[in-house]
Image (cartoon, rainbow, N blue to C red):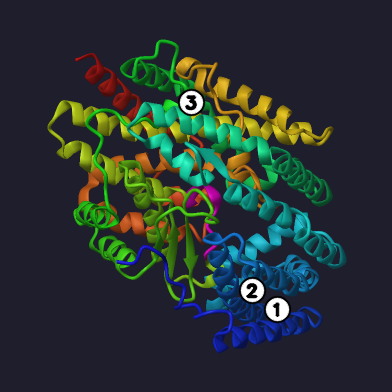
Amino acid sequence: MNKEWSLEKLYKGYDDPKFAADEADLDQLIEDFKALSSNLEGEAKDVLRKAIEINQQLEAKAHTLFSFASLSQAVNTSDAKAAAVQGRLSRKLSAIAGPRTSLVQYISSIENLEEVIASDSLLKEHEFYLTNIKESAKYTLSPEVENAISLYEISGSSAWSDLQSYLTSTVPVEYEGGVTTLSDIRNKAYDPDPAIRKSAYEAEIKAYDRIKDGIAFALNSIKMEVISHCQLRGYESPLDETLKNAHMKKETLDALIGAMNEYLPKFWEYMKAKAKLLGYENGLPFYEMFAPLEGNDTVYTTEQARDYLVELFSTFDEEETNMIARAFDESWIDFYPHDGKVGGAFCAEMPTIKESRILTNFGGTLGDVVTLAHELGHAFHNHCLRDNSILNLDVSMPVAETASTFNEVVAMNAAIKAEKDPVAKRALIESQLMDANQIICDIYSRYLFETAVFENREHEFMFADQLCEIMLDAQKKAYGDGLDHNCLHPYMWACKGHYYSGHLSFYNFPYAFGGLFARGLYAKYLNDGPSFVPLYKKLLKATGTTTVEGAAEVAGIDLTDINFWRSSLQILADEIDEFIALCNE
């Protein structure tokens, strides 16, 4: 089993003749698209069919080329060739911003669009895609302005995002007389030695001082660009844009956040119970949030992680089990941290070869195995979507985290159920609660932080120290007295790449959504048994062609009802009670 992913199914390198041929094809498809948009005449059905056919080919070529370059750069942020290729491709594609706007305006002008769609099978397949284009026309500017925006974003938000990624992946972190990476030092938060956890935290905090100003400029610039675009397009706010792009109702978000607020004190109880186990009286210091408890000291190799996950999911679904085995055996995964590799973990879909690629910074802990399960959940979601048109793969942010978190719950609950030793069981429950604490308290703190940043940025520039204060305030509100307020993490805004996108704001609440939605689905699985699995796959496939609420309806769930979210949170509250009881034994 290889420890690095392979991209050879895309290209063998930048000098691969196939790469040059695909880039030439992309150039031609761009010209074809421009020609179509300049001659939108004839029967609407024929124009729309042609538009879909060209778009499918264009998206496939662009996605494949970009994937190769961006994934190459993810494991080597200093890869100048990858950066150059992405810049070149971005410039090429910026040329269709104006023509795409013309097409959007054409589609929005078709008064009988529903009737036209119903008259053709290809159009019917892309009904959600086409109707969303008509809806988005309300927020689309003139072709000339859209083209200019697309050009400026290359040296604007995209470049600022690259700067944050570069700084956080290359900053030298001084530690124990040597130098290591930020991703490696952050992994030490899971170390069984409390002295290492504390010293690593201190080294991490110190390292940010070297790069905080550059990252602060990146964050301010990206958020100002987002605010300006929202104002130009007519969105009420960046959150309004996010919800519309996510095909999610504000009522759903309000129900989610409202339920989370109600249950925050329960999570503070969990953190205080863990703090007492570790010998702290005033809540957890931030560097102890991920401390493994006694009984949870197993270290996994990648081979053991594979066997563990394959065995666990064999009781759920054969199709997913086979995909997990393929991911390990066929070099879908890049496992270990190293200098120049981005931190964290992600899963990238590659629809043209019907596979995914997964990046992790594997350290061998149970948490790392759960992270693998999470990313493999994304891969299974991609697998369920594999037969969709490439234009029907745009899964909205909230449901994008559903399958990944469902996998976490399946993996952890199976391990907890099998464990007989009370100390080990307590450690496993705590591990699951530790992750749940992240999707509730941590995600809520991120939501509060980003909300405050957008509110402030419209009127002022926020230097690093002010951003740190905003983050500390958000953490105090979200974590309450569960954390020691004398030892928080002021730089969480600097290391989380989710803040640094000009096109994707508020990538925080979807994790809470996914975590709680997944638990509701898992409860349904326990109740319905094997008959649930086909329904689950149908739901995942539907996420590319319906709203967030529409996908939930496949499973008979009303997401605007706060009681659904309360029921999912109560599952976690019951686990917290069980954990506290085990702590008191």
Circle 3 or circle 2, nearest the eye: 3
Farthest residue, direction front: 177
Circle 3 sits in a helix, a strand or a loop, which is it?
helix
Circle 1 sits in a helix, a strand or a loop, which is it?
helix
Label 3 close to label 1 by CB (< 8 Å): no
Above or below for 475 versus 204: above
Give the alpha-carbon distance from disc 3 to disc 1, as whole Å: 59 Å
Residue 241 x/y as whole percent: 69, 47
Give the alpha-carbon distance from disc 3 to disc 2, as whole Å: 57 Å
The answer to whether residue 207 of the structure is visible from this angle is yes
| Crowd tier of the residue under label 3, counting other residues whose Cα lies within 10 Å: few below 14, some 14–19, many 20 or above | many
Circle 3 or circle 1, nearest the eye: 3
Residue picked out by circle 2: 116
In the image, 73 versus 537, the foreground residue is 73
What amino acid type should be assigned to the residue bearing mark 3?
A: Phe
Residue picked out by circle 3: 286
Q: Which residues are magenta?
A: 393-400
N-term-proximal mark, 2 vs 1:
1
Residue picked out by circle 1: 44
Give me the residue at 47% from left, 36% from top: 176
Query: Looking at the rendering, which quadrant does residue 449 occupy?
Result: top right
What amino acid type should be assigned to the residue bearing mark 2?
A: Val
Label 2 close to label 1 by CB (< 8 Å): yes
Residue 317 x/y as whole percent: 24, 58
| Crowd tier of the residue under label 2, counting other residues whose Cα lies within 10 Å: few below 14, some 14–19, many 20 or above | some
In the image, 387 versus 447, the foreground residue is 447
In the image, 108 versus 177, the foreground residue is 177
Give me the residue at 35% from left, 15% from top: 279
